[in-house]
Amino acid sequence: MWDGATSSAGPKCGRYARMPRLLSARITASVEESLQRLRTDYIDLFQAHDVEFANVEQSITRRFPAMRKLQEPGKVRYVGVTGYPLKTLGGFKKLCR
């Protein structure tokens, strides 16, 4: 297995044509697929991308918690989200405490 000593893995999940809705199951599947492709045990940084057009409340209450849940078994070290204005990111900040 890759030991992560020289580089980092940082895949993302997002809304794609084949899966336009970013559901909890899709988030988990994205991580599992990335782990297999990268031949590693964990992902350093996992980001939700292209979510600015999605429902913000769902992102805060469903998507981000699903991503955080992947930290518990150690599959993901850090999670992030892109595409939102700073004011909106405050809702995500509350979940990080």
Image: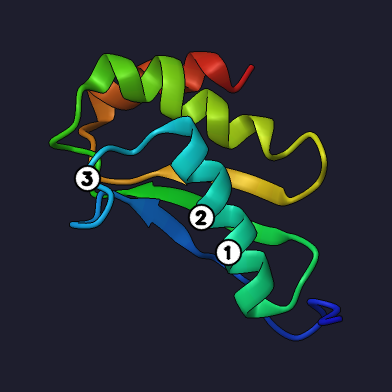
Extreme left residue here? 53
Q: Which residue in the protein does label 2 denote?
A: 30
Residue in the picture at 62% in, 71% down: 9
Q: CA distance from mark 1 to mark 2?
A: 5 Å
User: Where, quadrant-wise, is the C terminus in this rendering?
Assistant: top right
Left/right of residue 58 with respect to residue 76 in the rendered view: left
Callout 1–callout 2 Cβ contact below 8 Å: yes
Q: Is residue 77 above or below residue 1?
A: above
Secondary structure of the residue carrying tag 2 is helix
Element marked by disc 1: helix
Type of the residue with mark 2 = Ser
Distance CA(mark 3)–CA(mark 1) = 17 Å
Residue at image coords 50%, 37%: 25
Residue 1: x, y in percent?
86, 81
Residue receiving disc 3: 20
Question: Where on the picture, by quarter, is residue 56?
Answer: top left
Q: At 51% from the left edge and 55% from the top edge, which residue is drawn? A: 30
Q: Provide the secondary structure element on which disc 3 rests.
A: loop
At a point 42% along the width and 14% down the height, the residue shown is 61
Mark yes or no: residue 8 visible.
no
Between 21 and 88, the residue placed more toward the observer is: 21
Q: For the residue marked with disc 3, what is the amino acid?
A: Pro
User: Compared to 72, does 91 lie above or below?
Assistant: above
**Mark 3 or mark 1: whose residue is earlier in sequence:** 3
**Image position, residue 16 (x, y; %):** 24, 56
Residue type at the position of mark 1:
Glu
Q: Nearer the viewer, residue 10 or 16?
A: 16
To which quarter of the image does residue 53 belong? top left
Judge left or right: residue 35 versus residue 93. Answer: right
Residue occupied by mark 1: 33
Q: State the separation of the CA atoms marked 3 and 2.
A: 13 Å
Does residue 45 lie above or below 59 as drawn? below
